[in-house]
Amino acid sequence: MRKHLKTVFFLVPVGLVGAVAWYLGQDPFDRVKGVSMEVDKVEIGPAGQAVTGITLQQSAEGRTVWSLSAPRAERQSKTGITTVFEPDLTVHREDGESLRMRAMQGEVAGETRESPMVFSDQVRVEDTLGRRLTTEWMKFEPAEGLLSTDRDFQVDGPRFQLFGRGLRIFKDEQRAVVLGRVKLILKDQG
């Protein structure tokens, strides 16, 4: 009986460390370079791992670059894909402004802090200026600071509506490029 308890007490911490490592996909020295993670609960099974109450944050030079929180995430051992349920991502620009992206589901196919994140199903992006973008699919590429979609989208601002298909938002350049089927409606200011 004692041997089994020793094994359990050894495997539980190793499993927790392993669960954190699988999600971050980097060695402990890379975590020191700016990614922190908090979780409420970790479950490990033969098909993969499940994390409840997850918050990830990447920092650089003393400021937050992005943060991601979700009530649940699951990583499939066979595919290496992590599915994030109800993700809430905040991307911070160097000027202090931010973009907040929420969706019903997200996926991360890579295992590094620079891996692209794909959000789908009721994607909503809001900025601090009161503009709101809606689409069904959007990708965040942390390495490039790029948000993009190749699907139909709508942007509602205080004085305009913009419709199109395909969009690239460069977060630190404060620039957006619409790729096609553009329609702009200006609202009356009076």
Image: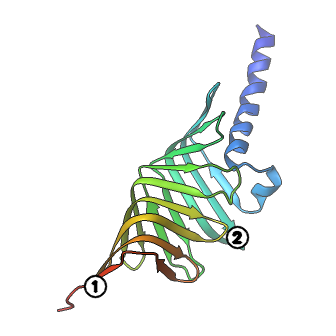
Colour scheme employed for the rendering of this structure: rainbow
- Using the rendered image of the protein, determine whether residue 53 is visible from the camera's viewpoint: yes
Q: Which residue is mark 2?
A: 60
Q: Amino acid at mark 1?
A: Arg
Q: Crowding near pointer 2: few (<14 within 10 Å), some, many (20+)?
A: few
Circles 1, 2 touching at the beta carbon (< 8 Å): no
What residue sits 48% from the left and 52% below the top?
A: 87
In the displayed structure, 129 sits above or below 31; it is: below
**Position of residue 21 measured from the top left corner of the image (x, y, whole percent):** 73, 44
- C-alpha span from label 1 to label 2: 35 Å
Residue 183 or residue 73, whichever sits in front: 183
In the displayed structure, 55 sits above or below 19; it is: below
**Position of residue 5 measured from the top left corner of the image (x, y, whole percent):** 75, 16
> Quadrant of the image for the C terminus?
bottom left
Q: Is residue 159 left or right of residue 77?
A: left
Residue 174 or residue 3, whichever sits in front: 174
What residue sits 37% from the left and 67% below the top?
A: 153
Q: Is residue 158 left or right of residue 15?
A: left
Q: Amino acid at mark 2?
A: Ala
In the displayed structure, 173 sits above or below 6; it is: below
Residue 166 or residue 52, whichever sits in front: 166
Q: Is residue 91 left or right of residue 18?
A: left
Q: Which residue is mark 1?
A: 159
- The residue sitting at the left extreme is 190
Q: Helix, strand, or loop for circle 2?
A: strand
Q: Is residue 172 left or right of residue 12?
A: left
> Quadrant of the image for the N terminus?
top right
- The residue sitting at the front extreme is 181
What residue sits 70% from the left and 42% below the top?
A: 22
Tell me, for residue 188, which label it has, or none.
Answer: none
